[in-house]
Amino acid sequence: MTDILLERPASLTSRKPRIGFLGVGWIGRHRMEAMLATGAVEAAVVADPSGETREQAARLAPGAASVESFEALLDQDLGGVVIATPSAMHAEQVRRALDRGLAVFCQKPLGRTEAEVRALVEAARRADRLLSVDLSYRFTEAAQALRSLVQQGALGGVHAVDLTFHNAWGPDKPWFYDPALSGGGCVMDLGVHLVDLALWLLEGAEVDQVSSDLFAQGVRIDRADVCEDYGLATLRLNTGAVVRLACSWNLPAGQEAVIAATLYGSKGGAEMRNVGGSFYDFVAERFEGTTRHELAAPPDAWGGRAAADWARRLAAGERFDPGVERLIPVARVLDRIYGR
């Protein structure tokens, strides 16, 4: 008698990855909404110490379990976890999730130091699980346009990059102002996006030298126990290019935010910048002599794209992504800016 292998119907064998959402404040809920909108994943559980916050998240996923702690979240049957908690918690929570065999999407920064980031990348490699960080500005149409110009060689050899992120308000949570919890002030909070953009736009370049000046309430500081509210840094790359970055909290900038990335090369320049002080609206232009050509403009609903990208990749069965190793040199530069 011939054995016959009966295949189960696809509807019975395929299941959306079940995701746990740890920390469902405004950012956590926004990323949750973006992931669920893809239709690629299922919200299995939301975890947050605040019952009111969990109730708000439950409106996005009425069928999800609601728990107070990370431990209770880990007891669920999950394929991945989204972490949107204070920075000091990231390293331990990401490690524990990976050790449980879960894929992870984490808010920035992944870790407060290069050592923490390197350990987590290695943990993801050992677990063979998809690890991504919400470095969302990469996903703006404006940043994508700049990267395309660089990759095509349209700007020639890029020799100068200016990066700016001034937030006229600053964070509203006390832990941001404790270096032991945050890992640093505005450079860790905002500058991480600038350093990441620089190394992502100039892919393959390495940082040879770093110099920096950090200020708190207008006074230059060199103490590890104080969070800076204004930071300047110059990065000299092995390509000969020089990257200058500036970021701040509570700056009297005349508008809510000043965000820009400007590149100059032997064949021309290009820039992305926010519009009218907006945190969300960006234009991108290419410069040729005294003329400029628009590359991207609002509207562009980019805020949840990094989260949605992770959800789709997870649903497609992706495992460890070596691209996450790029987070290590970003963390190394931040360490050097802080002189550690």
Image (cartoon, rainbow, N blue to C red):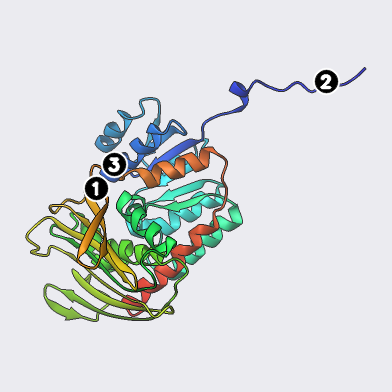
Does residue 62 lie above or below 249 as drawn?
Answer: above
Q: Which of marks 1 and 3 is in front?
A: 1
Between 65 and 184, the one lying in front of the other is 184
Mark 2, residues whose alpha carbon is within 10 Å: few (<14), some, or many (≥20)? few
Residue 40 seen: yes
Viewed as shown, does residue 220 lie left or right of 149? left
Residue hosting label 2: 4
Name the quadrant containing residue 35: top left
Question: What is the distance, in whole Å, between disc 3 and disc 2 at their CAs?
Answer: 51 Å
Name the quadrant containing residue 117: bottom left
Between 98 and 146, the one lying in front of the other is 146
**Farthest right residue in view:** 1
- The x and y percentages for residue 122 are 55, 62
- Residue at screen point 86% across, 21% down: 3
How many marks the image carries: the answer is 3
Residue hosting label 1: 297
- Residue at screen point 20% across, 58% down: 174
- Residue at screen point 37% across, 63% down: 196
Residue hosting label 3: 301
Looking at the rendered structure, which numbered label has been put on residue 43?
Answer: none
- The x and y percentages for residue 92 are 44, 57
Badge 1 marks a residue whose secondary structure is: loop
Does residue 7 lie above or below 53 as drawn?
Answer: above
Badge 3 marks a residue whose secondary structure is: loop
Please state which amino acid type lies under the numbered disc 1.
Answer: Ala
Question: What is the distance, in whole Å, between disc 1 and disc 2 at their CAs?
Answer: 58 Å
